[in-house]
Image (spheres, grey):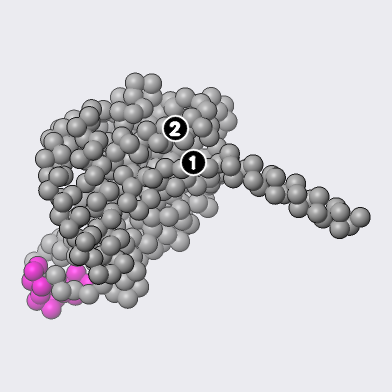
Amino acid sequence: MRKLLISKLFVVLIITTGTYSFSQSFDSPHFTLEHIGDGIYAAIHKPGGQAICNAGFVDLGEEVLVFDSFLSTAAALDLKQAIKELIGKPVRWVVNSHSHNDHIRGNQVFSPGASIISSSEIRDYLVIHGKEEAEEEQSHAPGRLAFYQGKMQEAQTEEEEQFARMWIGYFEAMVETFPDLVITLPDVVFNDTIILYGSKRSATLIEFQQGHMESDIVLYLPEEQILFTGDLVFKEMHPYLADGNPAGLKQTLSTLLEWPVNTVVPGHGDVGKKEDIQAMIRYIDMAESMAGELKMQGKTHDDLDFAKIPELYRNWQFSVFFKTNLQFLYDLIPVQ
Ligand SMILES: [Zn+2]
């Protein structure tokens, strides 16, 4: 009897788990979907794909909110399809967390239909620079793609291969999808905070200034304690600091640490925890003190090419950003 009961339970579990994972799965070459809450998904960039950044979507009840729209329309179209299959409700909002290309170029896939929402500062930046940046990217992309395809052929290590694969996806996205690109600007802007109420849950968007860029938006779901950070956080990857304000970024990260947060969806890297926010602060501290020491030693900007990545960060991806970050921080230190 007991055995029978166990085996029955086992069968039920298999069926339940099987059905569950089947209904939650969606296959895309551009991202992997992670179900992180009831009606809440993180879309994590897949190596070699054309998403490049992470994104996510949230069922608000009658409608869906999308956080970031990827670099390519191909990846954004897959995201739209995933929402159709897994939630089956219309997309009402698409948040642009900041103005870097990999977070905004898929906007056109959701518009018209959805409102694109950002801070007024992000919109202002895109009004001034958006078209010019996209044209420049499109003109350079074929040459850069060929360069990284060559790098892939020459790659000797897994890291070199991983690096070349990432940039191939990046420039392929531009070559393949930018000819049809329609610059689609945010049509709703806010400053500071906005709460979008749905019948199932509300989504809070908060703007921080002077962080990863001049303006960055996070999505916070207070009941679920889920935080989508955009590029304020990279998980186990060297962040890109050179378009922002490191002191402001650390201040923002310290603020985020004070919030009740269980799950962190970073702009790049896997889904993480609060510790990954702390790790970001430690990384900036490390890079700042290294840049300071090198300046004290009388090293020049060019000498930084030879600076070694500290042991703790050797396995982090995007190692090319280490040098960029160091040089950026070095230049911020006033000459004595
Ligand atoms: Zn960014």
Residue 225 seen: yes
Is disc 1 placed on a helix, strand or loop? loop
| Residue lying at the far bottom of the rendered structure | 297
Q: Camera-side residue: 95 or 108? A: 108
Please tell me which residue is depicted at 25% across the width and 47% down the height of the picture: 170
Q: Residue 313 lies in what quarter of the image?
A: bottom left
Three-letter amino acid code at the position of disc 2: Gln
Q: Earlier in the sequence, mark 2 or mark 1?
A: 1
Question: For mark 2, what is the residue?
Answer: 81
Q: CA distance from mark 2 to mark 1?
A: 9 Å
Magenta stretch: residue 125 in it? Answer: no
Q: Camera-side residue: 168 or 107? A: 168
Magenta-tinted stretch: 290-303
Please tell me which residue is depicted at 53% across the width and 53% down the height of the picture: 262
> How many marks can you see?
2
Residue 252 seen: no
Please tell me which residue is depicted at 62% across the width and 43% down the height of the picture: 20
The image shows residue 121 at horizontal and vertical percentages of 24, 35
The image shows residue 107 at horizontal and vertical percentages of 31, 31
| Residue lying at the far top of the rendered structure | 112
Left or right of 58 in this view: 130:
left
Question: In which quadrant of the rendered image does the C terminus lie?
Answer: bottom left
Q: Are marks 2 and 1 in contact (CB under 8 Å)?
A: yes
Question: For mark 1, what is the residue?
Answer: 26
Q: Which labelled disc corresponds to residue 301? A: none
Q: Residue 325 lies in what quarter of the image?
A: bottom left
Where is 42 relative to 276, above or below? above
| Prevailing secondary structure of the magenta residues | helix
Question: In which quadrant of the rendered image does the N terminus lie?
Answer: bottom right
The image shows residue 251 at horizontal and vertical percentages of 33, 55
